[in-house]
Amino acid sequence: MSRGDLPLAQDPAPPQATVLVVDDTPANLTLMAQVLRPHCRVQLAVSAEKALALASQAPPDLVLLDIMMPGVDGYEVCRRLKADERTRDVPVIFLTALSGTADETAAFDAGAADFVTKPFNNVTLLSRVRTQLLLKLARDRLKGRNADLSGEVRRRRREVEALRDTTLFVMVTLAEFRDGDTGAHIQRTQEYVRVLAGWLVAQGRAEALTGGDIDALARSAPLHDIGKVAIPDQILLKPGRLSAEEWSVMKTHTTAGAELLQRAVDRLGDDAGALLRYGLQIARHHHERWDGSGYPDGLAGADIPLAARLMAVADVYDALISRRPYKDPMPHEQAVEFISAGSGTQFDPQVVAALQACQAEMRAIAEQFHD
């Protein structure tokens, strides 16, 4: 916009604005061009169709619009401009010979920013135009700042998520490095949990879970054995079967992992997020049994957190089909049969049903992340 009769306050070098004038009378268009051109770029349209075409191609900064036009009237033009995402934010000033209250009300109902009657005073019209252009410029700048701020927030969020995921990776690999025989066990169980939880939600058997919960559950699954960092090497890395005393020590990885994650939850407070809370449940309770005979707390049935019930099936399934120094891998069908036999005793029957229904997906995961 030039700095003639339409100055932009406190803006030393504002852009020149474009005003689209719409009127079916050529003489009126000529007059408006003479009034406006010293101050801004002017586009002229002698019909509603021409105006809408020009506006959609390159949205102007302002529209001066007559009401009484053949075919499509000004009210309809304004409504169409406001319905189009490309032009909805362009202010419209009706410039018309109509002067009734009902006409003015209809104009504002259609989405007008202002209403000027003919014949008009040049100074008054220019002032109205300047006001709307200043408001649009301010809105555009605010929108740009908001977009920049939203982009910065997204960037910072990505940084936080990357740091969180990296921290989680480091925590998990601490245990993995000390128990090298597990191979891709962590990746597989993560995806097993995602598939099983997704099936339960799709079947309406886990109404409390959302898509975000499923993702948090899956990403927290690798924390199930984080407590193994507290198990002595002579027990954790023992190639043969553990003694009763050694097995008692091994079982403490559940409480050790839960204590470690509880410290993180306590430190973060409300910012801990679902990932850590699910991770804590999984670490402590993934060896509980549906009939209450598991450890460390002897929980039974639905008292066992769903995250831990999902992990129990995923963990045992993967252990069965994987090779270990002390055993050969079990075929998929036999592993499913073994877990199915434990439905209602060791495992949640609903999660077992999910395993039975998702066998193709489970096999695909096992093949993708094989040892």
Image (cartoon, rainbow, N blue to C red):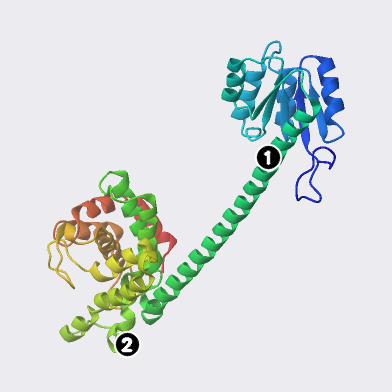
Q: Position of residue 95 (x, y in %)?
A: 72, 21
Q: Position of residue 282 (x, y in %)?
A: 29, 66
Q: Is residue 188 visible?
A: no
Label 1 vs 2, first from the N-terminus: 1
The residue located at (41%, 60%) in the rendering is: 367
Q: Is residue 50 above or below residue 179?
A: above
Question: Dot 2 corresponds to which residue?
Answer: 233
Neighbour tally class for label 2: few under 14, some 14-19, many 20 plus, Cα within 10 Å: few
Question: Dot 1 corresponds to which residue?
Answer: 136
Nearer the observer, 321 or 183: 183
Q: Secondary structure at mark 1?
A: helix
Q: Position of residue 80 (x, y in %)?
A: 62, 24
Q: Is residue 129 visible?
A: yes
Q: Are marks 1 and 2 in contact (CB under 8 Å)?
A: no
The residue located at (31%, 73%) in the rendering is: 262
Location of residue 296 (image quadrant): bottom left
Would residue 272 be found to the left or right of residue 77 on screen?
A: left
Q: Amino acid at mark 2?
A: Asp
Would residue 259 be found to the left or right of residue 159 on screen?
A: left
Q: Nearer the viewer, mark 1 or mark 2?
A: 1
Location of residue 326 (image quadrant): bottom left
